[in-house]
Amino acid sequence: DITFVISPGNHDGVRLMEPQPLLDEKYAWSLYDLKNVILTGNPAFVNIGTTKNFSGFDVLTYHGFSFPHYANSIPKLMATGLNSPEKIMAYLLKNRHLAPTHSSVQYFPFDEDQLIIKKVPDIFVSGHTHKSAVSYYNNVLMISIATWESMTAYQEKMGNQPDFCKVPLFNLKTREVKILDFEEKEAEGGRT
């Protein structure tokens, strides 16, 4: 009864240039066979929670490959860097573009810029930083998704302190966000 929305990022088998196409059926055929999976490109705009009496929530998904550029070049973002993805997300929403600086991402040219935020979403979801964060900017719920991978040498070198094993849940009825924490921590005298 759960529907999954899957969009690619910089470690997936699609071009690195943005916007990225959805995963190719040739390589991800097993995902195409699942009835509860929606495959999208990156970025994508999807609607969730639609009912007969409610138009649902408009969700903007963006992997976030432009985030390091802004964390390293915008003075007000440099203090916390990639450890505050919600601040970068708010900056992008304010600028109504997912990569408002030329060369912040490798861009695949189209007649129309596919990274412009034309419609203000209800929810903006991203994940490139591996950092869990939930915040609001001008009534837009921003959710940065964590990862299942703990600290790597690369993350440490970049000064990033990733969260791992944290899954945000958005309650469609109450609009409450809860973070499930699956990280096992060692307690005194053994594991918990």
Image (spheres, helix red, strand yellow):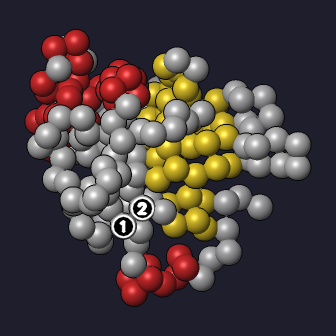
Q: Residues within 10 Å of mark 1 (few under 14, many from 20)?
A: many
x%, y% of residue 135? 51, 22
x%, y% of residue 172? 75, 38
Q: Nearer the viewer, residue 39 or 34?
A: 39
Q: Is residue 62 left or right of residue 31?
A: left
Q: Label 2 amino acid?
A: Gly
Q: Circle 1 — which element?
A: loop
Q: Are marks 1 and 2 in contact (CB under 8 Å)?
A: yes
The circle drawn on residue 127 is none
**In percent of the image, x 61 and y 42: which residue is there?**
58
The quarter of the image holding the N terminus is: bottom right
Q: Is residue 29 above or below residue 114?
A: below
Q: Quadrant of residue 89?
A: top left
Q: Circle 2 — which element?
A: loop
x%, y% of residue 61? 47, 47
Of mark 1 and mark 2, the one earlier in the sequence is: 1
Q: Residues within 10 Å of mark 2 (few under 14, many from 20)?
A: many
The circle drawn on residue 41 is 2
Q: Is residue 78 above or below residue 71?
A: above
Q: Is residue 67 left or right of residue 32?
A: left
Q: Nearer the viewer, residue 29 or 165?
A: 29
**In percent of the image, x 45 and y 39: which residue is there?**
118
Residue that extends furthest to the right in the rendered view of this protein? 53
Q: Nearer the viewer, residue 130 or 181?
A: 130
Question: Can residue 59 be seen by looking at this rendering?
Answer: yes
**In percent of the image, x 21 and y 59: which residue is there?**
109
Question: Can residue 9 be seen by looking at this rendering?
Answer: no
**In percent of the image, x 16 and y 14: which residue is there?**
75
x%, y% of residue 128? 32, 44
In the picture of the structure, the residue carrying the numbered disc 1 is 21
Tell me how far mark 1 sits from mark 2, CA to CA: 4 Å
